[in-house]
Image (tube, rainbow, N blue to C red):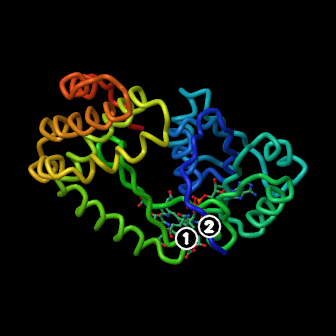
């Protein structure tokens, strides 16, 4: 089996978490902080879940025996994603079967073989502007965690990458505004990336000079395509772009 890596927008989606212990709590909060509406069913709930649910209408706790398929069914039907996380293997298997039979996506935190959705080890750089996810798909989380930490050390010390990121997130909306056709636009990203003055500025860690160099390339390419502009104007456009994301 080969799983496809994806990033999902969870805003307004519904997640049912079956099991309110340590693992169920982690998953519930993970999906909730990404914007999903979360319902947890369990025989009991962690202190943390109870505390968080009190002040949050998007996090609901329902006391219920998940071994009772009839009682569980409407909750599974309500959900887009079902998380399996009780400490009872036969209940976990029954929930997995029910969710699959109703064609819900399943994140089975208790069985790496049968889970459809894998929750990876993650790290965020630049306030969440660049994100990394690492997984062994359950073969050994310990190695995945070490890999994540090594990647973090490597990327956090890379001043050039930070500069490249700072310059290039501004380039994209400006190019989209200036050059209407994607076919014309796309090669320009590579012209900038390959421009020797741009590269030198990135190596030096100077966002200012990287933007100046990018503006020169964009103005040249835009004029070639019949768009009237100059490097100073493009530079001002680059400077005035709003940050595209706010961190989770
Ligand atoms: C398939 C997957 C589930 C999925 O995708 O839903 C899965 C499966 C299983 N993990 C188990 C054990 C532990 N997992 C952790 C921790 C984390 N595990 C997470 C993800 C995943 N775990 C997915 C694959 C990830 C990958 O492989 O790359 C993280 C990232 C996210 C999260 O869980 O929130 C979180 C990191 C928190 C952080 O540090 O940031 C700890 C440590 C702890 O709890 O503190 C332990 C106990 C100690 C140990 O085993 O190391 C067992 C039982 C093993 C057994 O019975 O022996 C299974 C089931 C099985 O193996 O079948
Ligand atoms: N993916 C991961 O990262 C990890 C997965 N695990 C797996 O997750 C399982 C759960 O671990 P924890 O949360 O630490 O256990 P826990 O003991 O803290 O919580 C178990 C939860 O399941 C609920 N539950 C039990 N029987 C139920 C039933 N019939 N109906 C409804 N709810 C029921 C309990 O009420 C409790 O809320 C472990 O047994 C293990 O298989 C364990 C560690 C990490």
Q: Position of residue 149 (x, y in %)?
A: 31, 64
Can you identify the residue that label 1 sits on?
Answer: 137
Local secondary structure at mark 2: loop
Q: How many marks?
A: 2
The residue located at (40%, 56%) in the rendering is 132
Quadrant housing the C terminus: top left
Local secondary structure at mark 1: loop
Q: Position of residue 234 (x, y in %)?
A: 25, 26
The residue located at (31%, 22%) in the rendering is 228
Q: Position of residue 240 (x, y in %)?
A: 27, 22
The residue located at (23%, 25%) in the rendering is 230
The residue located at (31%, 26%) in the rendering is 241
Tag 2 or tag 1, which sits nearer the N-term? 2
Q: Which mark is residue 160?
A: none
- The relative height of residue 70 versus residue 52 in the rendered view (above or below) is below
Q: Are marks 1 and 2 in contact (CB under 8 Å)?
A: yes
Can you identify the residue that label 2 sits on?
Answer: 3
Residue 246 shows in the view: no
Residue 76 shows in the view: yes
- Find the residue positioned furthest to the bottom: 139
226 or 139, which is in the foreground? Answer: 226
Q: Position of residue 28 (x, y in %)?
A: 58, 46
């Amino acid at each position: 089996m080969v799983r496809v890596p994806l990033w999902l927008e969870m805003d307004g989606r519904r997640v049912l978490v079956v099991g309110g212990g340590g693992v169920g709590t982690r998953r519930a909060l993970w999906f909730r902080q990404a914007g999903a509406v979360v319902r947890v069913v369990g025989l009991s709930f962690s202190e943390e879940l109870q505390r968080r649910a009190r002040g949050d209408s998007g996090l609901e706790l329902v006391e219920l025996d998940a071994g009772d398929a009839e009682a569980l069914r409407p909750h599974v039907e309500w959900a887009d994603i079902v998380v399996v996380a009780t400490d009872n293997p036969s209940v976990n298997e029954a929930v997995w079967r029910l969710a699959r039979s109703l064609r819900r996506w399943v994140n089975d935190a208790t069985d790496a073989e049968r889970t459809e959705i894998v929750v990876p080890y993650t790290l965020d750089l630049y306030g969440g502007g660049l994100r990394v996810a690492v997984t062994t798909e359950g073969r050994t989380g310990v190695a995945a965690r070490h890999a994540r930490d090594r990647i973090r050390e490597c990327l956090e010390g890379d001043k050039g990458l930070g500069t490249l990121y700072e310059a290039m997130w501004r380039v994209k909306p400006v190019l989209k505004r200036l050059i209407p056709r994607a076919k014309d636009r796309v090669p320009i990203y590579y012209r900038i990336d390959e421009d020797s003055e741009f590269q030198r500025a990135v190596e030096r860690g100077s966002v200012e000079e990287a933007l100046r160099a990018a503006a020169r390339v964009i103005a040249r390419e835009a004029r070639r395509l019949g768009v009237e502009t100059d490097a100073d104007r493009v530079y001002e456009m680059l400077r005035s772009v709003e940050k595209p994301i706010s961190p989770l």
